[in-house]
Amino acid sequence: MKRKGNNIGWCDKTANPVCGCPNGCEYCYARSMNNRFHWVPDFSKPQFFPNRLKEFRTKEPMIIFIDSMSDIAHWEPFWITDTVAAMVENNHNIYLALTKSYVAINRIKRLYSDSIPCPANFLIGATVTNNAQAQAVIDAGGADFISFEPLMERISPDVLCSLRCMWWIVGDLTKNGKPQHVTRTDWIEEMSEQATAYKIPFFMKDSLEDRLFCFGSDLRKEFPQGWKL
Ligand code: SF4
């Protein structure tokens, strides 16, 4: 089931208080969108748009992805503080962020530990595309959830065992919305089996839909327990 209002599939909407990212990933969709719409003059220099926090005011509870146009690791501390304050005001939603700078996960969560606790509905995941990154997540102390997108190589079962968390998402590399078949079906099948064994909800993105004949059933589109479907 595609979640309403976006093509990401695992969230109800995106709300991006920050635009721009210095990571320079070759496959960055956000940068190409910015090249088209010019939200910021230089995508490698993130900017804060506090008025976009109004988008957290939803009537219905939603899963909101807050950094599809940035990487939260590169946000200024006060951008995070203001964003978390808006989350607290709108605590009926679940807020998800992703990062490729894994040490930032605990650093951001620690920002709140002395005064106010980091809200339970604010979860920071790691984007992992290969074994080296997977090991780096483990070395950094883990993440709330993992997005294996685009999955560029088979992740070793031992490494996966140490990456147990609340949710795994997996998807192929896409270009202009089309899957590039970089992610092999047998890698996904193996990961799916491990997810089942570890009782981890497993979400397969629509970029894997043309392999349905291999999986023999619908794509698994599971969410952590208690999240609205
Ligand atoms: S981390 Fe995300 S936003 Fe940043 S360059 Fe890579 S794909 Fe783009």
Image (cartoon, rainbow, N blue to C red):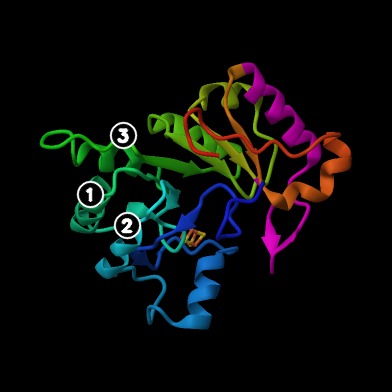
Residue at numbered disc 2: 57
Mark 3 → mark 2, Cα distance in angstroms: 18 Å
Dot 1 beta carbon under 8 Å from ligand 1: no
Crowding at dot 2, Cα within 10 Å, few <14 / some 14-19 / many 20+, comes out as: some
Q: Position of residue 31 (x, y in %)?
A: 50, 71
The span picked out in magenta is 171-197
- Figure label count: 3
**Earlier residue among tags 3 and 2:** 2
Q: Nearer the viewer, mark 3 or mark 2?
A: 2
Residue at numbered disc 3: 120
**Mark 3 residue type:** Ala
| Disc 2 + disc 1, Cβ < 8 Å | yes
Q: 97 or 25: nearer the eye? A: 97
Crowding at dot 1, Cα within 10 Å, few <14 / some 14-19 / many 20+, comes out as: few
Mark 2 → mark 1, Cα distance in angstroms: 8 Å
Q: 221 or 208: nearer the eye? A: 221
Mark 3 → mark 1, Cα distance in angstroms: 13 Å
44 is higher (above) or lower (below) than 36: above
Find numbered disc 3 in the image and state the secondary structure of the residue it sits on: loop
| Magenta-colored stretch includes residue 11 | no
**Earlier residue among tags 3 and 1:** 1
